[in-house]
Amino acid sequence: EDTIVEPGDSLKLHCDPENEGEQINFNITWYKNDQILQEKTENILILEDLNNTANYKCQFSNLAGNKSMSIEIIVSKKPVIRLSPLQIIAEKGDRVEYTCNIEHRTDNMMIDWYVGNSENSLLKVFKNGTAESADAAAASKSASNSTEPSLFDHLDIIENQTKLVIHTENTPHLKTIACEVSNPAGIERKVSKITVLEKLSLEVETGTDMPFPVTSENM
């Protein structure tokens, strides 16, 4: 059995024999991560200012034998994240980088990235740093209704899974990005909107009546 608490919380554990006969002349030993925590006849253990996940076990014994019960106390706080940028307009061919900032990151957190045409049709492309390769590629290409390369082919994650890099050369159908972080205490998701535009091309006529293309550049 698991119990989730936030850092700094207190908790009272009870250890009660199931049968009345076992309650006569018995001893209790408390363990934390299989190390003896304290030995006493009381069946209550008070934990204060919890900061670390641990397994607690009580073992009660009498002349007839012994029994034990255990509980996992998970110390965790629901993730708090910030995704940036929240909205961006990019030109086709740009390299766009998203950052998922996580407050108080811990080892038991999972970081997942989603992409899609809308918030209601998001596709998971990276699960805790692992590419959802075959399914993601096929579904992404199908969702785009396009013969162009799959959206998945133009994504990378860097910096310990907290950054998603998009190469927009062949991703005109991309509209929504989401970062989702979860731990035993809960899930937090942030969503960003992206618009990918074709690069503007102009034709300028010269005195020789020979038009030539001019491609705009950001200054």
Image (tube, rainbow, N blue to C red):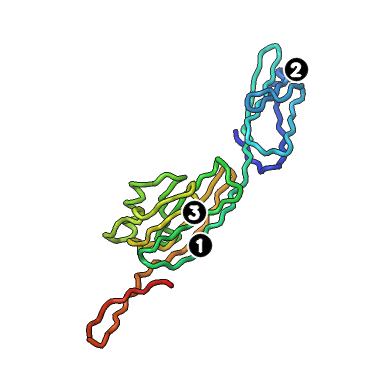
Of callouts 3 and 1, the N-terminal one: 1
Distance, label 2 to label 3, CA atoms, is 56 Å
Residue at which label 3 appears: 179
User: The residue under label 2 is which amino acid type?
Assistant: Ile
**Rendering coords of residue 72 (x, y %):** 61, 33
What amino acid does circle 3 point to?
A: Cys
- Give the number of the mark in front: 3 or 1: 1
Percent from the top left, x then y, of residue 62? 71, 14
Residue picked out by circle 1: 85
Mark 3–mark 1 distance (CA, rounded to whole Å): 12 Å
In this view, the residue in front, 42 or 75, is 75
* Residue 192 position (above or below residue 128): below
Choose the circle earlier in sequence order: 1 or 2: 2
Q: Nearer the viewer, residue 188 or 126?
A: 126
Is disc 1 placed on a helix, strand or loop?
A: loop
Label 2: which residue?
24
